[in-house]
Structure formats: structure tokens, C-alpha cells
Amino acid sequence: MASQIQNIERDRGQKSAAPTSTCARVETVNSIGTVRRLRALIALGWSQAGLAVRAGMSSRTVWLLVRHPELCPDVTLATRARVVELYDELSMKIPPESRHKTVAVRLARAAGWVPPLAWDDEDLDDPEGHPAEITPDDIVDVDMVAVRRVIDGGGFARLTRAEIDAAITYGYSQGLSSRQVAERLHMTQTNVEKRSGRHGLRAAA
């Protein structure tokens, strides 16, 4: 009998202690930076569903964040980290033409969301931060034929700001230095490097 009582007391102790080991508080942060990054990628043409898959999040979570951020004032550190990583990967990439891209761009334009081009990195997580003013042509209309022609040395073309950033990205991918890219874009090297730094781009060593 004594041993049975001891076993019962031991079981009770284990059951009462168990919840304390599994109820650790999950750290959260303000969702504003996460919301801005997702909206910016949608403005670039990436679909909500596609972003959800890439970030390992549910479509509903992404939908709530971009459409109803007031319902999601905070996100976990893990969620924020996944979205930051996704933003760094896609913010300078234009998705291929598709119905999903068209829908995403139309949604962003109707809602007034701006692409990564409009944001300085330090402003994304700042509640007081604001995007730069951009024209409709800067949203996502990138003529890659013109971009490649300029960088490959085939002549001059008047490029939008979005196309300039695409040209810098393309130039670096071809192994050009910031000075060489600047010469082909008829810009100063300082200006090219400033735009590069804004988007985390680096010329080939």
C-alpha cells in the first residue's frame, strides 16, 4: 500500500509539473515590418499563395497580415525571420508573367501598396517610416530587353527607377563592377553604390 501511495504521489507530481515545461512564452514583435515586406513583394507581382508556400506559412495567415493587419498586431520572431529571409531573396526579382502576377499587381495598386523599390531597409520596421514617392511606371513595369541592351553595351535607353535597379542587379550578375555599371547607365559610381546598398547588392569581387 505504501508503495502504491508513493507511485500515485509521484504521478501527481509529474502531471502537475508537466505544463510548466511546455508553456514557455513565445516571443513576439510588432508585425508592421512583416506586413510591409509581404505587401511590397505582392506589389512586385508575387502572389499571396506563392509567398505563403515559400515562407512555410498558411495562406490564411498571409491573407490576414496583408489584408487585415489590425487583427495581427504581433508576429512571432520565427515568422518575422522567415519573411525577412523571403524578402531578401525576392525583393529584387521580378516574377514571370502569369495570371497570378497580374492579380497580385492589380491588388497592390488598388490597395496603394508599394514595391521594395520604395522602401529603405531601415524604414521597414519603423512605425514612423514611410515609403518614397514613386510613379505608376516604377511599380513593376521592367523592360528586361532594354535593361540587357544597356548593360550588354548595346546602346542607351531611358530606364525607369525599377529598371535601373534591375540593370544594376543584372550587371553585377554578369561580373561587372559598380564603376562599369555606372558607366553603362550614365550614372555616378556613388549613386550606383548607394542604390546597391539600399537593396543589399554587391558587385563581383
Image: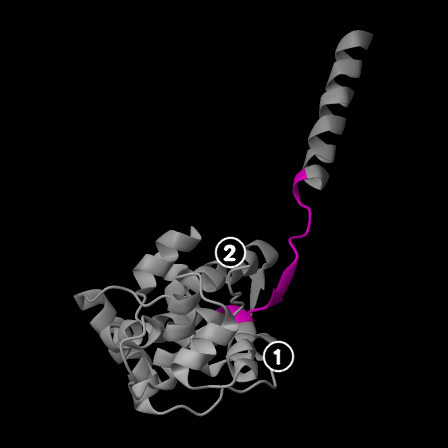
Q: How many marks?
A: 2
- The answer to whether residue 21 is above or below residue 79 is above
Residue 55, percent across and down?
Answer: 43, 54
Please rate how many residues cluster around mark 2, counting C-alpha atoms within 10 Å: few if below 14, some from 14 to 19, many from 20: some
In the image, residue 182 lies in the stretch drawn in magenta: no
Q: Which residue is mark 1?
A: 126
Q: Which residues are magenta?
A: 22-34
Q: Amino acid at mark 1?
A: Asp
18 relative to 181 in the view: left or right: right
User: Residue 82's mark?
Assistant: 2
Residue 17, percent across and down?
Answer: 74, 34
Query: Seen from this angle, which residue lies furthest right?
Result: 2
Q: Earlier in the sequence, mark 1 or mark 2?
A: 2
Q: Circle 2 — which element? A: helix
Residue drawn at x 39%, y 79% is: 184
- The answer to whether residue 2 is above or below residue 115 is above
Q: Quadrant of the C terminus?
A: bottom right
Location of residue 98 (image quadrant): bottom left
Q: Circles 1 and 2: CB distance less than 8 Å?
A: no
28 relative to 109 in the view: left or right: right
Q: In the rendered image, is residue 36 in sight?
A: no
Query: Seen from this angle, which residue lies furthest left?
Result: 99
Q: Amino acid at mark 2?
A: Arg
139, 67: nearer the viewer:
139
Residue 68, percent across and down?
Answer: 42, 74
In the image, residue 31 lies in the stretch drawn in magenta: yes
Q: Circle 1 — which element? A: loop
